[in-house]
Image: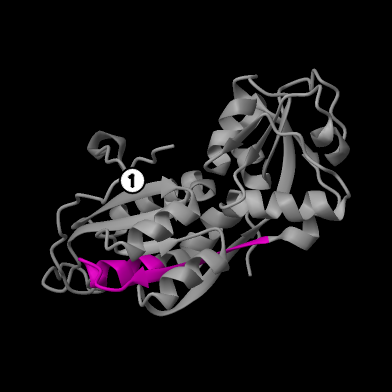
Amino acid sequence: MTAFPRRAAPARRAALALGAVLALPLAACGEQAAQGAGTTSDAITGEVVVLAAASLTDAFTEIAADFEAAHPGVTVTLGLGGSSALAQQVVAGAPADVLATASPGTMATVADAGGLVGEPTVVARNRLQIAVPPGNPAGVTGLADLGDASLAVALCAEQVPCGAAARRVLAAAGVTPAPDTLEPDVRAVLTKVRLGEVDAGLVYRTDVLAAGDDVEGIDVPGADAAVTDYPIAVVADAPNPRAAEAFVAHVRGEAGRKVLADAGFELP
């Protein structure tokens, strides 16, 4: 599945296939945003490219808009998709400024390749829920139903964090899943449920909240054993390092933490 970077402001969105090397224009390297009123010489400017796990879609879209409002000289381009695919793109040299994944292990592969500046910081945590269509027409009650071959079930592929977490939770419950589809990221699983194409899917709690009335959530016993951490870091050789540092600081700050908490993420 192809992920598409998008701008925080819809009118400025630029679709860009993340399945290939990102052909993004290099951002102008600006200075740190001025704190004094009327001072513009120190303002950061240009484009900051943020690659983020699909489950961060709603929170990071809001955070990006807030960041642009606080820094009028900056535009944020979001590249959203499966963490493993995003990490591979950074390692391959795709021009990106910030990486936020749904897995410390995935982030570690980038760090081991020398692709990060400093140590990643965990900014949020998440846990799994079973998502079902409104009214739960198949009568799903728990994890055991995900092993019922008569039901249509969607899971994330095992190489992405939501798939790895699902595998751990199902194994702990002694359930052998019978998925009808394995999706490249958690939002693809959520879409299958929202469209009524499957009877159930394992997604994150925040995805259920973001879907509103389009899905219902069922708590997963043992989900505490597979909590997902979200690290963020500045990418080495970032085209716009000053803006990248400012964006990470914004996510880690009070405003960013509030958006994440409001979206249902747990804060470290």
* In this view, 241 is above or below 178: below
Q: Give the x, y percent position of residue 24.
A: 19, 51
Q: Is residue 267 left or right of residue 139?
A: left
- Camera-side residue: 112 or 97? 112
Q: Residue at x 26, y 51 (%)?
A: 21
Foreground pick, 142 / 88 = 88
Circle 1 residue: 18
Q: Identify the residue at horizontal 36%, vertical 48% (top origin).
A: 79
> Is 240 a magenta residue?
yes
**Nearer to us in this view, 48 or 157:** 157
Up-down relation of residue 3 to residue 67 (above or below): above
Q: Could one spot residue 209 in this view of the protein? A: yes
What is the three-letter code of the residue carrying label 1? Leu
Q: Is residue 197 magenta?
A: no
Q: Is residue 5 above or below residue 122?
A: above
Q: From the top left corner, tell me how far across and down residue 94 is, in percent.
A: 27, 58
Part of the protein shown in magenta: 228-249
The percent coordinates of residue 164 (x first, y second) are 66, 54
Mark 1 Cα shell of 10 Å, populated few (<14), some (14-19), many (≥20): many
Residue 7 visible within the image: no
If the image is split into quadrants, where does the C terminus sit? Answer: bottom right
Residue 104, by quadrant, is: bottom right
Q: Secondary structure at mark 1?
A: loop
> Can you tell which quarter of the image residue 43 is in?
bottom left
